[in-house]
Image (spheres, rainbow, N blue to C red):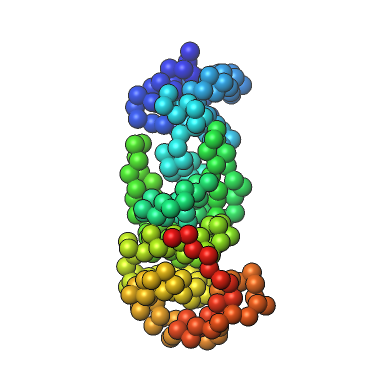
Amino acid sequence: MLIGKFVEGRASGGRNSFSLEEAVHATGLSLVAARASLRRLKQKGRIAMAFRGFYVIVPPEYRRLGCLPPEQFVPQLMEHLGLAHYIGLLSAAELHGAAHQRPQVFQVVVPVNRPQLRCGEVRVQFVARRNASEVPTVRHNTPRGYAVVSTPEATAFDLVGYPHHCGGLGNVATVFAELAPGVKAKELARLAPLSPLPWAQRLGYLLDAVGFRSLTEPLAAYVARTAREYVPLNPKQRGRAGKRSARWKLRANERLELDL
């Protein structure tokens, strides 16, 4: 009863998550008793444990999911863990309107490697980027607050930087075709120094390939000033020859298969 009232109070106050420590402090139960009570609520589907010692309250409309949608609890979990983060890659692209293929996992960028998280039917994949705290973000409103999402330009750099997490370069180029209308050319060039130079070279090449050369002039100027050697389009196939792009100092060693 004590735990049930605590959970009801959190929900009625607009709070959708809590830690084990908060439950113990609020109810006065022992750690063992609190865990047992929470286990019973979890079995009834009223709560889910998204991470060890961190719970989300599951309203009736999400009981089949077995958890809250990730954008509604990941921000609170990251705050609980004290980690800088942002929603990135395909998940960010979807929130920016590039929803050609719904991602199978919810992708979150953090400064250090973390194992994938599962909560009910929800899967959260963490992608490590050392300077994650420096990447520009925007707020995305959710029914339970807001989530932090990489800007369209920062999303574009991450997509080309982590193609193995995004279905390959062909899929990245396909996503660019939908993401590009929300991208600003000068902002691409401004953000380029935050990422490895080959990312800018591959990003510019792919944007040109899907018909958005108008967005890449400032980025091409940055590459012309800074690039000293040709890089492969697909770094996993370094030994494979490919047609050279002087504009991007790039060897197109992979044939792009676009789903446009």
On the image, which quarter does residue 15 sit in?
A: top left
In depth, the one of 76 and 59 nearer the eye is 59
Q: Is residue 49 left or right of residue 177?
A: right
**Residue 27: image location, x then y, percent:** 48, 20
Q: Is residue 259 left or right of residue 36?
A: left
**Residue 238: image location, x then y, percent:** 64, 75
Q: Residue at x 55, y 77 (%)?
A: 252
The answer to whether one can see residue 85 in this image is: no
In depth, the one of 21 and 98 nearer the eye is 98
The answer to whether one can see residue 141 in this image is: yes
**Residue 21: image location, x then y, percent:** 52, 30
Q: Residue at x 38, y 60 (%)?
A: 179
**Residue 214: image location, x then y, percent:** 33, 75
Against 257, is 230 above or below?
below
Against 258, is 110 above or below?
above
Against 41, is 132 above or below?
below
Furthest residue to the right? 239
In depth, the one of 170 and 91 nearer the eye is 170
Against 149, is 254 above or below?
below
Q: Is residue 47 left or right of residue 187?
A: right
Number of numbered callouts drawn: 0
Q: On the rendered image, what quadrant is the C terminus found in?
A: bottom left
Q: Is residue 14 left or right of residue 253?
A: left
